[in-house]
Image (cartoon, grey):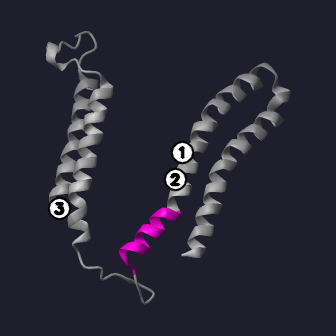
Amino acid sequence: MYWLVVLMSFAIAGLIITGIALEMRPVASPLRLPRWTKPAMGTQLVVFVGAQLGLLLLGVNDVFAQETGSAVEGLEISTGMGLAIIGAGIPTGLSTIGAGIAVGPIGAASLAAITEKPENLGRTLIYLGLAEGIAIYGLVISILLLNRI
């Protein structure tokens, strides 16, 4: 299991060091790369995410091979209980992502509307509140699911 953590740490540290090196280069000197280093950023991202998923899939056997000896309030947590708790947290995560995607354009549009007509502040706050309500709905669903476990 430790090899997985070390490998992922090296991958992340390499990305950070590369970003810092590219950021610190002088502005006047253009970045001259050989022809073979011109792949699109999307391809690099897909390869990186694929490698991380591969590492996770290879490391799952190491995680499941360990004994489950943790106890919470006298109850032993099994693999199924752990997956149920993760499943209860998924609605909050996904709804928060959705609320973030919704609030971005609404916030930008509301700032533009308030700049032109300041009396529209109340309406724009209602629209922002509706978009943020998505995250609250996901939190409520997660709480209801946790009560069922």
Residue identified by numbered label 3: 2
Can you say which quadrant of the picture contains the N terminus?
bottom left
Q: Is mark 3 on a helix, strand or loop?
A: helix
Boundaries of the magenta span: 77-88
Residue 97 is labelled as: 1
Whole-angstrom CA distance, mark 3 to mark 1, is 31 Å
Can you say which quadrant of the picture contains the C terminus?
bottom right
Crowd rating for badge 2 (residues with CA inside 10 Å; few <14, some 14–19, many 20+): some
Whole-angstrom CA distance, mark 1 to mark 2, is 6 Å
Which residue is most to the bottom? 74
Type of residue at label 2?
Gly
Residue in the image at 21% along x and 43% along y: 11
Q: In this view, does 60 lie to the left or right of 135?
A: left
Where residue 98 sits: x, y (%)?
A: 58, 43
Residue in the image at 45% along x and 64% along y: 86
Where residue 105 sits: x, y (%)?
A: 63, 30
Quadrant of the rendered structure where residue 71 is? bottom left
Q: Is mark 2 on a helix, strand or loop?
A: helix
Type of residue at label 3?
Tyr
Q: Are marks 1 and 2 in contact (CB under 8 Å)?
A: yes
* Secondary structure predominantly adopted by residues drawn in magenta: helix
Quadrant of the rendered structure where residue 104 is? top right
Type of residue at label 1?
Ile
Residue in the image at 61% along x and 44% along y: 99
Q: First in sequence, mark 3 or 2: give its number.
A: 3
Q: In this view, does 22 lie above or below 33?
A: below
Front-lying residue, 15 or 81: 81
